Image (spheres, rainbow, N blue to C red):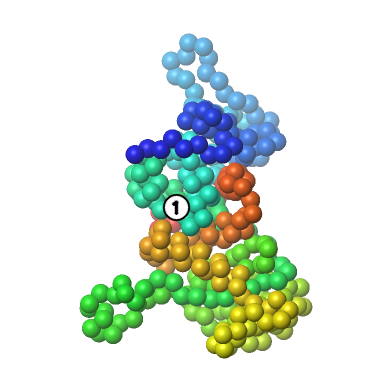
């Protein structure tokens, strides 16, 4: 069944492709259109001549500097997509408003597109959700977990031979009251954890972890030092507000999404799903519209080609 849901903030005529395109232009080009090829602002909208038998494409512009034609979707995740732009807007709303994510099968049914198209659409949006290179600051909690490979999901073959389900190690770094960054790692060893923290956390920050031995010595790299809680002794909060509960809340949400929405995530794409949950986490106090607009604003310069993604 195709849904006619509207994204908050989008004009009522969202089902009109022209209206959807105008809305996207207002977000991606807040200061007016510019050429995505040469960045010139000396551009004009192409309109078909009256009585022409070959009407121009919707939203087509031409640059007076490099003389190339373009639309607002060029150079964004929407480029070369055959899915109508108003359906893209619905997908943007669903993925930014759904706390535990939106399954591709659900989008496939709601938008009336194929499952393959919905799956690739979701990954394009996750690609746009990928965070920047700015390091986390302030009080940063770090924790690691293993996802996937539930014990009860093992086949009889695996049980008989004592084969343990394969899990993916994921590290999360969460700034209290701020953004989060999570990604899969090869293992939760000392060198990997130390490098991950140093690459993603500012030197003037304070780091909070549990007593896992791999974190030993990380405080030497940060002005605020390193504080720990001992979970093996049922210690969860120490005086001075020392805890890792924020990072554990992030993992709780991620795992609820995996088990309840996606059911299974391959190691190859785990990082993309972490980017999705980190994007929503960093804007958890924002409205659905603000998250949707933030995602649309992040789409330029983030093209994702199917063959490259599957390589």
Q: Which residue is drawn at 60% across and 73% down?
A: 245
Percent x, y of residue 59: 54, 29
Write down the residue under mark 1: 102
Percent x, y of residue 49: 53, 14
Question: What is the count of numbered marks?
Answer: 1
Q: Residue at x 70, y 36 (%)?
A: 31
Instruction: Name the quarter where the N terminus is drawn.
Output: top left
Q: Nearer the viewer, residue 248 or 187?
A: 248
Q: Which of 126 and 153 is in front in this view?
A: 153
Q: Residues within 10 Å of mark 1 (few under 14, many from 20)?
A: some
Report whether 92 appears left or right of 198.
left
Percent x, y of residue 115: 34, 48
Q: In this view, does 147 lie above or below 213?
A: above
Q: Which residue is drawn at 48% across and 57% down?
A: 100
- Residue 235 in which image quadrant: bottom right
Q: Spot the residue most to the top.
A: 51
Can the viewer see residue 70 in this picture? no
Q: Nearer the viewer, residue 199 or 178?
A: 178
Q: In this view, does 217 lie above or below 74?
A: below
Q: Which residue is drawn at 67% across and 62% down?
A: 178
Can the viewer see residue 238 in this picture? yes
Circle 1 SS class? loop
Instruction: Name the quarter where the C terminus is drawn.
Output: bottom left
């Amino acid at each position: 069944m195709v849904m006619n849901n509207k994204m908050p903030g989008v004009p009522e005529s969202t089902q009109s492709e022209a209206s959807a395109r105008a809305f996207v232009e207002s977000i991606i080009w807040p200061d007016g259109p510019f050429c995505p090829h040469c960045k010139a602002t000396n551009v004009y909208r192409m309109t078909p001549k009256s009585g022409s038998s070959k009407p121009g494409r919707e939203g087509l512009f031409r640059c007076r500097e490099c003389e190339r034609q373009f639309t607002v979707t060029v150079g964004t995740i929407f480029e070369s997509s055959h899915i109508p732009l108003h359906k893209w807007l619905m997908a943007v709303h669903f993925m930014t408003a759904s706390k535990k994510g939106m399954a591709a099968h659900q989008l496939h049914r709601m938008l009336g597109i194929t499952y393959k198209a919905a799956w690739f659409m979701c990954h394009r949006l996750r690609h746009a959700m990928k965070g920047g290179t700015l390091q986390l600051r302030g009080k940063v909690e770090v924790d690691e977990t293993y996802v996937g490979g539930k014990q009860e999901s093992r086949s009889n073959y695996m049980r008989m031979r004592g084969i343990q389900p394969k899990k993916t190690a994921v590290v999360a770094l969460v700034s209290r009251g701020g953004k989060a960054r999570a990604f899969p790692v090869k293992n939760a060893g000392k060198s990997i954890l130390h490098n991950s923290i140093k690459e993603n956390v500012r030197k003037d920050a304070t780091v909070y972890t549990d007593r896992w031995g791999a974190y030993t010595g990380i405080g030497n790299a940060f002005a605020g030092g390193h504080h720990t809680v001992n979970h093996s002794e049922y210690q969860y909060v120490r005086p001075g507000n020392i805890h890792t509960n924020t990072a554990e809340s992030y993992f709780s949400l991620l795992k609820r999404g995996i088990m309840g929405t996606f059911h299974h995530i391959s190691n190859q794409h785990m990082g993309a799903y972490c980017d999705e949950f980190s994007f929503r986490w960093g804007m958890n106090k924002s409205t659905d519209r603000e998250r949707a607009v933030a995602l649309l604003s992040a789409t330029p310069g983030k093209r994702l080609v199917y063959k490259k993604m599957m390589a």
